[in-house]
Amino acid sequence: MASGSGSLMWFRKGLRIHDNPALEDAAKGTRFLYPVFVIDPHYMEPDPNSFSPGSPRAGLNRIRFLLESLVDLDLSLKKLGSRLLVLKGEPSEVLIRCLKEWDVTKLCFEYDTEPYYQALDVKVKTYASNAGIEVFSPVSHTLFNPADIIHKNGGRPPLTYQSFVRLAGQPSWASSPLSITVSSLPHVGDVGSCEISEVPTIEELGYGESPQDGFSPFRGGESEALKRLRKSIADKVWVATFEKPKGNPSAFLKPATTVLSPYLKFGCLSCRYFYQCLQDVYRNVKRHTSPPVSLVGQLLWRDFFYTVALGTPNFDQMRGNRICKQMTYWCRYLGMTMMNCWRLGGMLGQDTLGLMLSWFRSALQVGLDASSSTPLCCMFFNSWRSGRDVFERLLIDSDWAINNGNWLWLSCSSFFYQVTARYLSAQILELPF
Ligand code: FAD
């Protein structure tokens, strides 16, 4: 057993130093700090049989983005007198092994609403409480605590954006400054016999030589996220007049939106810091747009989907999902064939870049893309879950709550489906078949 008492900071998302309450708490009053990231084969193991490079659950672009984010985090930790300890295996088993091996009295990690992480967290928390280890798991991936909103709404999530916004009000932390800089961190303690490595490269993970050309222009990491945020908010007029869905959806070199979603997904950027920066801009202009179309409004959409996802059992399914319309798909075989064509053809650009801008995404999904009406047909013959699966694997910003939420909505299976259905029927009448 290593000597001295310490804290373990378990990074999963929240790959940042700024506004990271779990890290802040882990570093407080401790002799040693163990900053850990576990390479999880569930997401990272190469799948040679997949239709494009990557693991069964993540395309190579997302894996690469994650590795870049980890390298950046490691560099930042090193500047603060620490470093990232990278381990590999089933995360709860690895964590429990570390807690047994190291003299740790506190375990800190960011609260996560995804079912996969919730199940892991139960295992780790159960071990920790039996072993007398204190656990601190704050909410910092969303603006609000989704559980609080559900509680305020009598135990069920609000199903309209307006009711969500009304219940949410102002975030409790909004008027006090967030902790953005850290001056130093406690040293890493003795790691005993635990197998620690540096952040692996794509090749070390078993993906072989990777072509450079096809990769996304968006580099992962907190440094890049903060640079991108500063660039976005520097143009105060643009922030103040931001209004979705206005803007050119196909403008890729100078996107009509912030392109911060992959950084929010991995927590390289704190959504709370983003929100405070936007509020600062709003305070310094005469007039600004408001939710749902403003930039703050976009962050509220994100929180809305997180809240509904947490409060809806089987949110990612049709069966057993009380908010999802139970549809009959006309011809599954035809639907699957169309979906495969769409996946291999239409998604080619997406596969290369791993990111599609918002309205381009909706257009692809509902078949408004001038070149193809395939996805639209897919929705009549096939379940929204097939398209969801393609996005889930290939998008860099693939996010369980947001992806499922948007597919449920745009397939008219849930949420504001009457409005969407009216809009879609108008579009169908214009299609050339
Ligand atoms: P901006 O317009 O600059 O907005 C700022 C932030 O607000 C975004 O980064 C995002 O975190 C949030 N936001 C914006 N639009 C939405 C929305 N519709 N729902 C929830 N949050 C939103 N977004 C993801 O992050 N991950 C996904 O897996 C995902 N899947 C989608 C699937 C479909 C079918 C559709 C139609 C949309 C999906 N979106 C997803 C939402 C949206 O397309 C992206 O969040 C947006 O394109 C990201 O670009 P941006 O960062 O420039 O957004």
Image (spheres, rainbow, N blue to C red):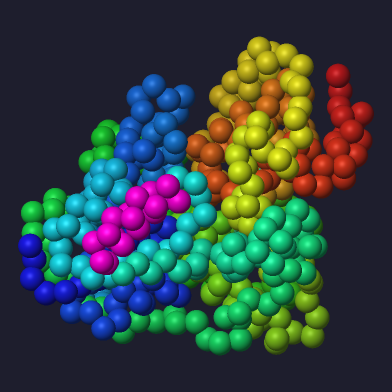
Residue 289 is one of the magenta-drawn residues: no
Say which quarter of the image contains residue 431: top right
Whole-percent x, y for residue 218 in the image: 48, 54
Q: Who's the residue at 36% across and 28% down the image? A: 47
In the visual, does 85 lie left or right of 47?
left
Main SS, magenta region, reads helix
Q: Position of residue 295 (x, y in %)?
A: 69, 67
Q: Nearer the viewer, residue 77 or 166?
A: 166
**Vertical relation: 418 (above or below) 50:** below
Residue 174 appears in the picture as rendered: yes
Query: What residue is drawn where x is 54% and y is 39%?
Result: 392
Above or below, comparing residue 260 to residue 421 in the picture: below
* Quadrant of image for the N terminus: bottom left
* 65 horizontally vs 288: left or right: left
Q: How many marks?
A: 0
- Whether 101 is drawn above or below 203: the answer is below
Q: Is residue 123 above or below residue 31?
A: above
Q: x, y percentage for residue 100? A: 17, 57
User: The C terminus lies in which quarter of the figure?
Assistant: top right
**380 lies left or right of 99:** right
Nearer to the camera, 96 or 231: 96
Residue shown at 71%/40% (left/top)?
322
Q: Quadrant of residue 338?
A: top right
Residue sticking out furthest to the front: 130
Residue 332 position, x and y percent, is 68, 16
Residue at 63 percent of width and 23 percent of height: 339
Q: Nearer the viewer, residue 132 or 59?
A: 132
The answer to whether residue 223 of the structure is visible from this angle is no
- Give, as a single range, the part of the protein colored magenta: 117-133
- Residue 130 covered by magenta stretch: yes
